[in-house]
Image (cartoon, helix red, strand yellow):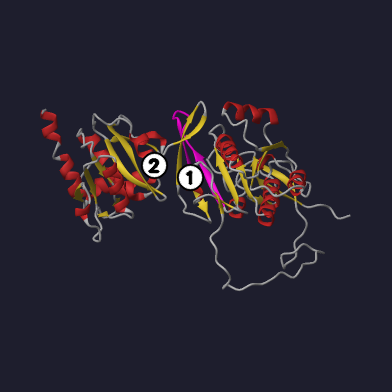
Amino acid sequence: MAKQKTNYICQNCGTVSSRWAGRCDSCGEWNSIVEEALEAPIASGGARLGAKGRVIELVGLDGDRKEAPRIASDIKELDRVTGGGIVHGSALLVGGDPGIGKSTILIQAAASLARAGHGVVYISGEEAIDQVRLRAERLGLSDAPVKLASETSVEDILATLNADKPPALVIIDSIQTLWTSAVESAPGTVTQVRASAQSLIRYAKKSRSAVILVGHVTKDGQIAGPRVVEHMVDAVLYFEGERGHQFRILRAVKNRFGPTDEIGVFEMGDSGLREVHNPSELFLGDRDNPSPGTVVFGGMEGTRPILVEIQALVTPSSLGTPRRAVVGWDTSRLSMVIAVLEAHCGVKLGMHDVYLNVAGGLRIQEPAADLAVAAALISSLAGVALPSDCVYFGEVSLSGAARPVSHTPQRLKEAEKLGFGKAAAPMPGKIDTKSYGLTLEAITSLSGFVARIAAQAPAQRKD
């Protein structure tokens, strides 16, 4: 009998090595490499050795093109993130930090769909049935006709699902707890996660049942296991939020049936997660008394315009290397904005500590926040309180020019709807500035914009 071959796979990033090591060369994680048995050998054509293929049907490109049918839940924020509802036969991967609310939002979605007449199966591999029932009772969902089970064997789960009519939705919580006898590895390893996910995705495509897989995340915030699992599924959703804040953000980072970077906003309460239909009011909070270093940024998350407060604090540093602390934005982007301010605007921040925070715990990813960040830094450095009814957005180039950004009309309409009277941003040539009830300040260069803010410093300090 031939000796079974093994590989050494990092459980943090999925890198395959031929020998064991204490530290992974790819991700740098310690004690994450585990020895796993190789699967059956694969021939050069892609089929397993000794296996016979079957003739598949080939079709043309001119077939009937129908919109993918969706399962619309009563949770509008969840439907927004998924692109209008969950598509039949699709596979979704939901990730998030422990205790962030993944199981809560999924049990609420399961109950909503079950009450609407859809068949829903909830399979938990981490909790017992009584524990799931206690959560449902606390959320007031005990009367929902959701079929519940606690199992970790993929073969048993598929046999149970195939024994009855295919449900509309299957929720697996979580994929790291499942194991299949087809792979000789411990549950939670990279090989087991990949094989289990592949079996469930194959069931979803054949039965037209939507499958939602819950995935753990690593210390870096990435879904644990190989990234190939993210490529296998149709949509990847991340549940974000800070423990110190009451709201949660569900963000789509991949969606084959809808827009990416779409977000849904929820507020965590005693009765579960509540939808927030106007996130801008939540992120802005009380802004009656303007203070130096605070501005309002007009951002876009997917197709939704969101206004959020950006806070900056610039203080003289007592250290040889000044601090640069950022929460909710890219640190490299902040360094670029500081370099442009010093090179083209004459602003010296080399001996100052810079602290930047996006209020409410929201994470901003688009470069349109450059102008708002620059305004907040200059406002804090000069001690100038900018107008509280003004919104800022725009991209800053390395040459010091301010460039227009996409979705300018949507940003301006959101600001006008929330009662803002001014907007400072680089304006594209096609936009009709007279059609808005805002006083628009067209920004062309960062140096001129900074000079206008700094000119207000002497007058305010005299007061």
What is the three-letter code of the residue carrying label 2? Answer: Trp
Give the side of residue 226 with respect to residue 238, left or right.
right
Q: Position of residue 275 (x, y in %)?
A: 46, 37
Q: Residue furthest right?
A: 1
Within 10 Å of the Cα at label 2, are there few (<14), some (14-19), or many (20+) other Cα atoms? many
The vertical placement of 99 against 216, above or below, is: above
Residue at (76%, 68%) from the top-left corner? Answer: 54
Label 1 vs label 2: CA separation? 16 Å
- The quarter of the picture where the C terminus appears is top left
Of 4 and 192, the residue lying toward us = 192
What is the three-letter code of the residue carrying label 1? Answer: Arg
Mark 1, secondary structure of its residue: strand
Q: Which mark is residue 251?
A: 1
Of 296 and 42, the residue lying toward us = 296
Residue at (63%, 26%) from the top-left corner? Answer: 134
Residue that label 2 marks: 329
Q: Position of residue 231 (x, y in %)?
A: 59, 54
Q: Is residue 124 visible?
A: no
Q: Position of residue 318 (x, y in %)?
A: 30, 29
Q: Which residues are magenta?
A: 235-250
Q: Is residue 409 visible?
A: yes
Residue at (62%, 32%) from the top-left corner? Answer: 143
Give the side of residue 257 with respect to residue 15, left or right.
left
The vertical placement of 107 against 367, above or below, is: above
Total numbered circles: 2
Q: Mark 1 or mark 2, which is nearer to you?
A: 1
Mark 2, secondary structure of its residue: loop
Is residue 232 covered in magenta?
no
Q: Position of residue 303 (x, y in %)?
A: 40, 51
Q: Earlier in the sequence, mark 1 or mark 2?
A: 1
